[in-house]
Image (spheres, rainbow, N blue to C red):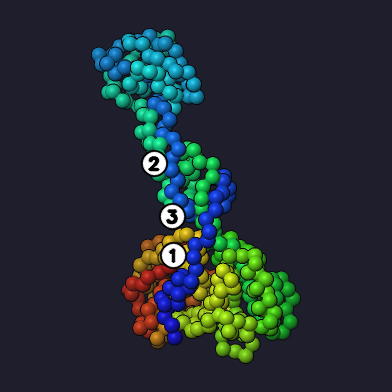
Amino acid sequence: MRSVEDHRQQLIDRVRPLAARRIPVLAPELLGSVLAADVVSGAALPGFDNSAMDGYAVRAADVAAAPVTLPVDGDIPAGDTRRSTLAPGTAWRIMTGAPMPAGADSVVQVEITDGGTRTVRIERSVAVGTAVRRLGGDVEKGDVVALAGTQVAPWHIPAIVSAGHVDVDIFPRPRVGIVTTGDELRSAGSDLAYGQVIDCNGPMLASLVAAHGFTVGPVRTVGDEGPQTRAALTALAEEVDAIVTSGGVSAGAFEPLKLAFADDFEFTQVAMQPGKPQGFGMLGDVPVFCLPGNPVSSLVSFEVFVAPALRRMAGRPVDALSVRATVQTGWTSPPGRAQFARVVLDRERRIVSSGGQASHIMGGLAAANALAFVPAEVTRVSEGDVLEVFPLIGGP
């Protein structure tokens, strides 16, 4: 059997970041996308000397002997496009963000004045440069305001827009199609005949795609026939950047993924619980991740194998965030296989098992908010052990 790390790395090595493209800064898809090129400022920020507070623009030398009273030459509001000049021994009343008059070197905060409009009494002196935002004091023209590789968040937008950009180059988020397999599957809300089950993997995998910040493509179900499965995936590959399937990769007689792609895809076993049977192949440039059909196995396989590969396609770092957490109540782990145990992680970084660890148990899955990694050589997890834990989306 292949190790978890070997299989994960092979999948990561088979995919590439999607081709960069340019989108408007106001496009909703920008948030969460990764910049494909540095964003360089086309202007100095701020673009002119301006006041950092409401007050009076003065020469510091004219208020050195405060308290003093100075005549007020007028008002400079924010947005004023006039080019004002400060005469020696006078003041301009100025608002936050307004351009400084030529000759002024400081701003006196209104709170240390009498607030006068014709004359102003200034109670304390100020140093040269007080409350003045200098031209280019934040960003010089030609400075990089956001590096390539940055995953864009709301706090990056002000710098990008202020630097003069209306569009940027990004690696798009992969559009991922989902295919679940099995004659027994029916859509949610269906009346079930004996032997039939609700397809929960399709909605779950689509939700995982969205929760990780990728784009959900078509979600489809196919039966247990190889030709039907091959036709469905081949057609879907024309619409998406990646495909995730569930079911049809084990050792049974009716395994549609194996029947459809035995000569084209690689099917293997990974030394892990849950999620031992795995498959992978390419339809043209579109990677196809073939996951086992049990719900817990599908979820764990997506988190461990698919999400890192999709992150690479999106230009993001491939590794998931993890924490070290202390076991509160122990459990057993299968010999010779790494275990990804469903656990409940609290904010003090303590964990307990969320329930039974069999791959079909959905109640324990619903209670979990993290996966705890148990190395293959460990067969018993004991109270007080410290494990690497991967919070699930929405976990603490």
Residue at which label 3 appears: 149
Placement of the C terminus among the 4 image quadrants = bottom left
Q: Dot 1: what SS? A: loop
Counting from the top left corner in percent of width and height, residue 88 is at 33, 11
Residue nearest the viewer, comparing 156 with 66: 156
Amino acid at circle 1: Val
Q: Are marks 3 and 2 in contact (CB under 8 Å)?
A: no
Q: SS class of the residue under badge 3?
A: loop
The dot on residue 143 is: 2
Image location of residue 320, percent across then percent down: 43, 65
Residue 151 horizontal/vertical position (percent): 46, 54
Q: Where does the image place residue 224, in percent across and percent down from the top left?
A: 67, 83
Disc nearer the start of the sequence (3/1): 3
The image quadrant that residue 192 belongs to is: bottom right
Amino acid on which disc 2 is placed: Asp
Instruction: Answer few, some or many: residues within 10 Å of disc 3's Cα (few below 14, many 20 plus, some between 14 and 19).
Output: some
**Pointer 1 residue:** 318
78 to the left or right of 249: left
